[in-house]
Amino acid sequence: MNDAPPAVTAAIAAVFGAIVGSFLNVCIYRLPLGTSIVWPASACPHCRREIAWFENIPIVSYLVLRGRCRTCRQPIGMQYPIVEAITAAMFGFAWWYYGPSVLLVSRLIFGCALIVLFVIDLEHQLLPNVITLPGIVVGFAFSFFTEPGWIDSLLGIVVGGGTLLLMFYLYLLVRKKEGLGMGDPKMLAMMGAFLGWKMTLVALMFASVAGSLVGLTMMATRRGSMESMLPFGCFLAVGAAFAATIGPSMLQWYLRLF
Ligand SMILES: [Zn+2]
């Protein structure tokens, strides 16, 4: 592998990523339903016909079938090829950016968790414990072998989870209703475990700014009130992706302003 040009190895990583993305789709579809992610085989949600292997090729099958089930002609969600394409891009990019390392494996597992959380939060306003809680453990375990180191990781769990928990209770106190779900603090604790406390705060800041901007835009265009804005977990996932890549240089730039 080391002799192959970087573009070739990144492309191989992307193809592998598309296959992983196909599995993430299964998780996204089944986790909110509480059914097993390994059994039974995937079926069309409309006509229940089992999906053959050649209909299950990431991205390609969707294009060949023109986004419809082969039997009942019902449309297949755009979410499937999009998740596969984004996972493929993430694997290709991460391979190129981090190189073969423990950090690469840690970041890919983290990235897959973020993709699943993003889509499930978008569709169900839910951040399942089956992702966030094991995510905290896995992130902390990786921190003994790679960035950010176990002390930083532990602080990340406490600071990340604690900050949002505090915001949760403050909002409850002031507005007399829940502004965040309890899934958000657990997701931020997971981000803390993988990224360490500094990058978690960078991700939180990014998510808050992006969330406010989108919320204000939606209010200004009268497409929804502040309450009906996108779930916060989606912004956290995007913030985490930024923090995991350009976060350190963003923080340096910001600190130099003072
Ligand atoms: Zn069908």
Image (spheres, rainbow, N blue to C red):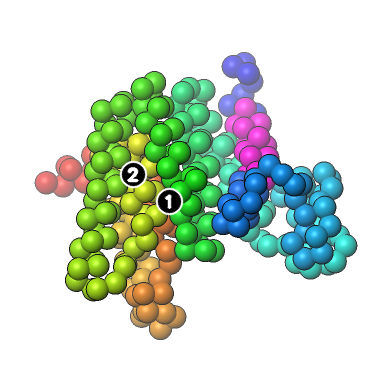
Give the x, y percent position of residue 163: 24, 51
Of 180 and 79, nearer the camera is: 180
**If the image is split into quadrants, where does the N terminus sit?**
top right
Of residue 6 and residue 34, the one placed in the foreground of this image is: 34
Identify the residue at the far top of this view. Answer: 3
Residue tagged 1: 237
Which is in the foreground here, disc 1 or disc 2? 2
Name the residue furthest right.
71
Going by the numbered disc 2, the residue's amino acid type is Ala
Which residue corresponds to mark 2?
189
Give the prevailing secondary structure in the magenta stretch.
Answer: helix
- Residue bounds of the magenta highlight: 9-23
- Say which residue appears at 42% left-offset and 79% top-offset: 224
In the image, is the residue at mark 2 within 8 Å of ligand 1 by its beta carbon?
no
Residue at coordinates 32% horizontally, 29% vertically from top-left? 148
Mark 1, secondary structure of its residue: helix
Q: Is residue 152 left or right of residue 218?
A: left
Pick the front one: 3 or 43? 43
Residue 242 in view, yes or no: no
Measured as percent of width and height from the top left, residue 152 is found at: 26, 31
Dot 1 amino acid type: Ala
Residue appearing at x 53%, y 31% in the figure:
95
Location of residue 101 in the rendering, given as x and y in whole percent from the top left corner:
48, 22
Q: For numbered disc 2, what is the local secondary structure?
A: helix
